[in-house]
Image (cartoon, rainbow, N blue to C red):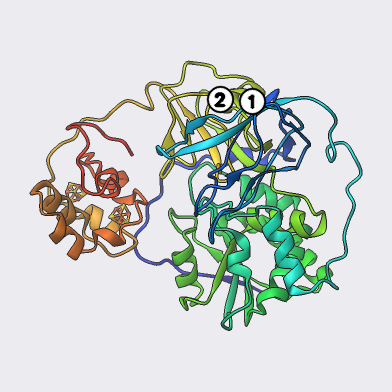
Amino acid sequence: MTHEKSLLKGGVNPPDDRSISRIPCIANALVPPCAVIPLLQHAGSPAQCIVKAGDVVREGMLIGRAEGHSSANVHASIPGVVTATPEITLPGGLISTAVVIELGGEFDRSGRREKIHEWEKLSAQDLLARIRSAGVVGLGGGGVPAHLKLSPGAAVPLLVANGVESEPSLSADYALLRERTRQIAEALRICGALIKPGRIVLALRDDSRDLVPEIESVFRDCGLECAIALVPSRYPRGHEQLVLSLLDGRSAASVVMNVATLNAIWDAVVLEKPLIDRVLTIVGGPVARPRNLKVRIGTRIGDLFDECGGLSTEPGKVIVGGPMRGVAIGSLDTPVTKWTTGIMAFSSAESRIRREWACVRCGICIEACPWGLVPARLHKLIRMGDIEAARREGLSRCTGCGCCAFACPSHIPLASIFTSGGALPPAGEVTR
Ligand code: SF4
Ligand code: SF4
């Protein structure tokens, strides 16, 4: 059964070119000659490095062991020889040890027939062990290890498959829903067997309604009882808490799984395949042939632009993620990680820093904030140096979604001010 869900307050409609989502088939990116695999690609502590320079590793071999509660295993995405384990800086400034592997030797999985494992007779413990061992984490950008969300505990009223990809111009989740429908449905059955939810709902953007007939048919075939909810295509409707609000599932016990995470759960349980690749969108004005590619973790971002026909002009800015919450990177050597949902290149004109003007008290930022905050007020308090008062007025509830900054006619970089803990960026700089 398909339901349409009405608007919550707030949100914005940035330019959203999803034309590449119509390009059929997710292509496999070339195997990189070298993979740089960070040991911090999840919400908790970095995985512990268990290899050293000179070690020979096989495709899918464990190279970083989960260390602590919210940590996750990390595996070799290519076979070869470990040449170094340096410290690298990840997008957003996190520092992580990385394992550098030079390609060599045979592939254990790629190009071979995949063995399908029956999962229905496995115990909950064994299902969770496969998901945990494969290093599956939230691929929507959260990075929380999937087995933590799926551990049996309190009754779960609602399980949501989140296919609401609200960052403009990204369409990897749409492509997965179109091409991996059966795997996603089966993964929902696996999750259902683990947490026994009261109901299951797939949430989709309303402009993805063309997928609904095929999805409903696959759900019927798989014997999966799952309603489909169409959510307005308005940023940031894909945020977990907003999706739950729209579906009346605000209980803390409800579970939300991104569709890319569900696809990885299927790989982990049915193929016993560790998480060594992911599907992501490569897009932006200078990109000659924007595409959705399945990319091995650790692939250099510059190599992916080459695979998309190169860049027509020197980009003014490259970001990892979408245009609203993405993080600018300083080097095309930055590797793809488990939480890279997309890569965007902007021309110099598109990246031009806009001059910041004084607040004109128009109130547009208040209308734009989906969380009911008063961004202009928070900004004023921060400018006055009263961070404590800003906190009392909800600064800590700010998700950094960027709606207020996008809407502000004075180009005040509200979101980056709020997410940098109240530290003001240089005057006149807009770093949306
Ligand atoms: S960045 Fe923060 S204050 Fe601005 S709209 Fe988003 S949640 Fe509201
Ligand atoms: S949108 Fe900008 S100019 Fe308008 S009230 Fe908010 S901060 Fe001030």
Residue drawn at (55%, 52%) of the image: 140
Binning the other alpha carbons within 10 Å of mark 2 as few (below 14), some (14 to 19) or many (20 upward) gives many
Can the viewer see residue 334 in this picture?
A: yes
Q: Secondary structure at mark 1?
A: loop
Are dots 1 and 2 in contact, CB under 8 Å? yes
Q: Amino acid at mark 1?
A: Cys
* Image position of 45 with respect to 216: above or below: above
Using the image, tell me which numbered label, if any, was put on residue 300.
none
Q: Secondary structure at mark 2?
A: loop
Task: List the residue tagged with mark 2.
Answer: 287
Residue drawn at (37%, 56%) of the image: 11
Q: Amino acid at mark 2?
A: Val
Task: List the residue tagged with mark 1.
Answer: 308
Image-quadrant location for residue 181: bottom right
Residue 225, x across and y down, in percent:
72, 76
Residue 288, x across and y down, in percent:
59, 22
> Residue at the left extreme?
384
Locate the C terminus by quadrant: top left
Can the viewer see residue 229 in this picture?
A: no
Residue drawn at (77%, 32%) of the image: 79
* Image position of 201 with respect to 333: above or below: below
Image-quadrant location for residue 336: top right
> In front: 409, or 380?
380
The span from disc 1 to disc 2 (Cα, nearest Å) is 7 Å
* Image position of 218 with respect to 411: above or below: below
> In front: 386, or 161?
386
Residue 405, x across and y down, in percent:
28, 45
Locate the N terminus by quadrant: bottom right
Image-quadrant location for residue 335: top right
